Amino acid sequence: MQFPGRRKKLIGSSQNDLYDHCLQFYGQPPLENISLTEFETFAVERLKLLKTVENLGVSCVKNSEQYTKKLDAEISKFFFNKEDGISEYEKRRKDHISHFILRLAYCQTEDLRRWFIQQEMDLFRYRFNDLHSKHKTDFLHKNNLKYETVSAEEKKSLQDKLIASSYGLSGTKVEEHDVYKVPFQDALDLVRTRKVYLLAGNAYIPHHEIVTIVLNDFRTRLSKALAMTARSLPAVQSDERLQPLLSHLSHAYVGQDYSIQKNIGKISLEQIDALSGKSFPLCMRHLHKALRENHHLRHGGRMQYGLFLKGIGLSLEQALQFWRSEFVKGKVDADKFDKAYAYSVRHMFGKEGKRTDYTPYSCMKVILSNPPSQGDYHGCPFRHSDPELLKQKLQNYKVSPSGTNQILELVKGMHYQLACQKYFELTHNVEDAGFSLNHPNQYFTESQKLLSGGRDIKKEVDMSQRSQENPASVTRPSQANSKQAHEEMGDLDSFFQDE
Amino acid sequence: MPTSDYDPACLPDLLPLYYRRLFPFSQYYRWLSYGGVSKNYFQNREFSFTLKDDIYVRYQSFTTQNELEKEMQKMVPYKIDIGAVYSHRPSQHNAVKSGTFQALEKELVFDIDMTDYDDVRRCCSAADICSKCWTLMTIAIRILDRALREDFGFHHLLWVYSGRRGVHCWVCDDAARKLSVAARSAVAEYLSLIKGGEETVRKVVLSDPIHPFINHSLSVVERYFCQYAIVEQDILGSKESVDKVLALLPEDILSFPVVLGAQLTVISLSLTYFDKEIMLQYCYPRLDVNVSKGVNHLLKSPFSIHPKTGRISVPIDLKELNTFDPFEVPTISLICEELERPRADEAEDDDVKDKENEQEAGERRRIRDYKRTSLAKYVKVFDRFLEAMARSRKGEMLQKSDLQKDF
C-alpha cells in the first residue's frame, strides 16, 4: 500500500473497473494517494459505523425491523456526502479505503483484531443479505467462489432429501430459489451439524445458507490479512503523520468532547450532592462518594472526576473551592492544598504549564486506560468492579433485582457502556435511553435533559401538543424548567436518600 | 479352530521370522508411496515403534523400502503405528528450524472400539469380544462405509481388523489425505449420533426433519436389530435389561416396548421417535472424534501384530463382511507354524532362483512364503485395494493429459 501523500491523484477511466460491485472482500489494498484529511475523516466515519454495528448487535435482535432501520440509517450517513450527491464510485472508494485504514489501527492485538473482524462481518452480512438475488450470484462469481447452481432436474430429483436436510426449506423454496453445489470442505459448519444434504462429496446449499459460507470465507481472509498487516505495521507507524492518528483510532472516542464548557457557573456547589445521585454516571457517583467520605482522592480519581466537573460546568473558582473544602476536612491543611493540589486543578483548566485545556475523559478512555488499584476509586465500575460488589452497590442504589441482572449480563458480555446505559434507563425509569452512551458528560447532559422534561419520552407527546396550543409557554424554558427541575429534584431526592 | 495357541512370550522368536519372511513389504511400500506422485511422500512419513519392554520410539522414517525392511528386522517392533507425512524427514526433525517441521497430510482415519459400547452390550465388557457383539462392528462398517462413499464421495477405503476389539478405517483418497483438522472433525461430527458419557442415559435424540443420513443408517440398523438385540443380546430377556431400555424413554410417557415382527416398536402416546432412538443407541457406531481429528495422530499399522492376542491386523474384505470372524484371523504363531510346514513342489523352484539377484530372490521367496499361510487371502484383499487406487490414479492422469491435449 502506498502511503498517503499530499494531493489526490486519480487514474481516471479505470474507475468502473476498480469497483465492479458495491460489495467487496477487500482483497486488494487501495493504490492511490489521498490527503491526510481524507485519511482521518474516512477512518473516523467508518469507526462510527462499526461502533453502531456493535451497539445494535447487542441491543436489538439482528435483522429485526428496529435493527434494519437503524443500521440502514447509519450506513446512509456513512455514504452521504454533504455536497450534491455522492457517486456510486465514490461510495465504493470510501468503503474500500476506510476499511484498509482501520486495518492498520486494529491489527495490533488479538482483542482489537477480534473486535474488528466481528463488526466487519456483521456489516458485511447485513449488506450482502440486502443485495438482490442476482447481485448475490454476481458477487460470488466475481470473487471466484466456485459455487455452481444445481440444475432444475437435479433439484427435482433430490427435492425430498433437500427438504429433510436443510432447515427452513420447503418444496416451493427449492423450486423457486437456487440451490448451490459446493465441495463439502467449503461448508464445514453445515456439515459438522448435519444441516445440509451431502452427495458424492458435495454439499447442496439453499440460497439463504450461502451467506454463512461466504461469511466464513470473509472471516478467514480478513483474519489472515490482519496478521500480515500486523507484521508490516512498524513501517507504517514510523511515519510521523500517521502514528498519532492510528494510535488514537483504536481507542477513539468519536463524539462530542465536552472541552468547550457550556453552562459555566450554572451548577452551584450545593447541587453537586444531589446531582451525583440523579444525573451522575456510576463512575462519577462512586468518585464523589469516595471524596466525601475520605476527603481525598488520588491523582487518577482527581483527573477523572475533576475534568468531569469541568465538563458539567464548574468554573475554575468553583472547582478550587470544591476541592479545597473537601481536602481540608481531611488531612490536608489549606496551605498545603494551595501549594500542592491547587496547581493541578488549575492545570486541568489549562491555566498552568503548557496551557492545554484538558478534555474530560470519554468512556473508552476510562475503561481502557489506567486501571484502578488498591486505594483508587477511578475507572469504570462496570469494567473494574468485582461483579459481586457491583451487584451490592446497585442494590444499595435501589436498582431492581431484574434490572441488576440485566446489567450484570451486559457486564459479563463486556458491554460496559451498554451496562451503564441500562443503569441510566433504570434510574431514570425510561425504557430506552435514546442515546448511545460514550461519555460520562453525555450521561449527565442527557440526564438533565430528561429530568427537566426536555426529552422525556412519555412527556414528549404532551409537550409537542402543548407547544402547538400555547407557544407562549415554551418561550422561556430555562426559567420554567429550573423551577420544575427544582421541584422534581425535591421528589427524587428522597428516592436517592439512603446510600 | 485353526489357530495355534499363541503365547506372548514367544514374540521375541516369532517377530523376527515374521518380519523376515512374511510381512508384505512391497505392497506396504507401494501403498504408502501412493504412486510416487508426490515427491518424498514415503520418506517424510512418520512411523512409531514400540519395542520390547515397552520402549516407545517416534519420528522413525525411511528413505527406501529396503531401509524400512532392514530397520524393522533390526529393531523388531512389537507394535507399529503410522503417522503423518511431514514437511521434512521425521528422523531429522530435530535438525529443522523450530516451527517449520509440520504435519502436512495423512489418511482420514476412524477407530471403532468395542469398549465404547459397554453400556449397551450384555455379553462382554472391556477388551473382550465375542461373536454375539461382533455384529456391532458389522453394523458400524456398513453404515460408515456407505456414508464415506456416498455422502462424502470417497473411494479408497481400507477397513482393518485391529487385532483385538475393534476395527479401523483408512480413507486413502487424495482429497482425504489433504483434509484440514477442521474438516476431519466436521466429518467425524457428521457421522456421530451418540452423544454423552456415563452421566447421560438417553444418548440419541432425534427431531424433525430426519436427515437422509440418519435414515440410511437406520435402515442398516433395522436389518440387524432383531437378530442382534433381541436374540443375541437378549435385551428384553431380564427385568434388569428391560429396565435399561425403558430408562431411555422420557418419564412422562406411558409406554412399553414390544417386539412386533422384526422391529422393536414402542407403543406410546407420543409422536416422537423413541423406537428409532433406542435402536440407534444400541447399535449405531461410536467413534472417537479425537482419533479422526488430528493430522498427526498415530494409528496402528495394518499387518502389525497385536501383542496381547497375537493376531495380525488384517484388511477386511467387505464383500465377505457377513462371514468375517475375528476369531478366524490368523495369529503370528499360526502363520509361523504354517511357514515351517514343508511343501514338495517348491524344491525345484529354489534351484532355478538361486542364480538370480539376492534381493529379488528374497522377495520372491517371501511372496511364496506368505502365500503358504493363512495370511495369503488378506494380502490379496490389500492387493485389490492397491490396484483400485492405481487404476484411479491412471484415470486421473489420463484426464489431465486429455485436457492438456498431450498425446
Image (spheres, rainbow, N blue to C red):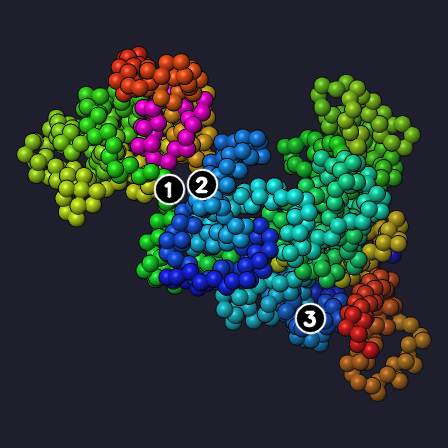
Front one among A268 and A385: A268
In the image, residue B378 lies at what x, y percent?
84, 61
- Secondary structure of residue under mark 3: loop
Front one among B9 and A307: A307
Q: Where does label 2 land, which residue? A: A51
The magenta segment: A425-451
Up the image or down, B58 lies above or below A122; here it is below
> What is the three-letter code of the residue carrying label 2?
Lys
Q: CA distance from mark 1 to mark 2?
A: 10 Å
> What is the three-letter code of the residue carrying label 3?
Ser
In the image, residue B143 lies at what x, y percent?
80, 46
Residue A445 included in the magenta stretch of the image = yes
Residue drawn at (73%, 48%), measured in percent from left and top?
A180
Name the residue at the bottom extreme: B355
Up the image or down, A107 lies above or below A394; here it is below
CB-based contact (under 8 Å), mark 1 and mark 2: yes
Q: Nearer the viewer, mark 1 or mark 2?
A: 1
Q: Is residue A274 left or right of residue A466?
A: left
CB-based contact (under 8 Å), mark 3 and mark 2: no
Q: Residues within 10 Å of mark 2 (few under 14, many from 20)?
A: some
Q: Which mark is residue A394?
A: none
Chain containing the residue with disc 1: A
Q: Where does label 1 land, which residue? A: A254
Marks 3 and 2 belong to one chain = no
Q: Which comes before the other along the chain, label 1 or label 2?
A: 2
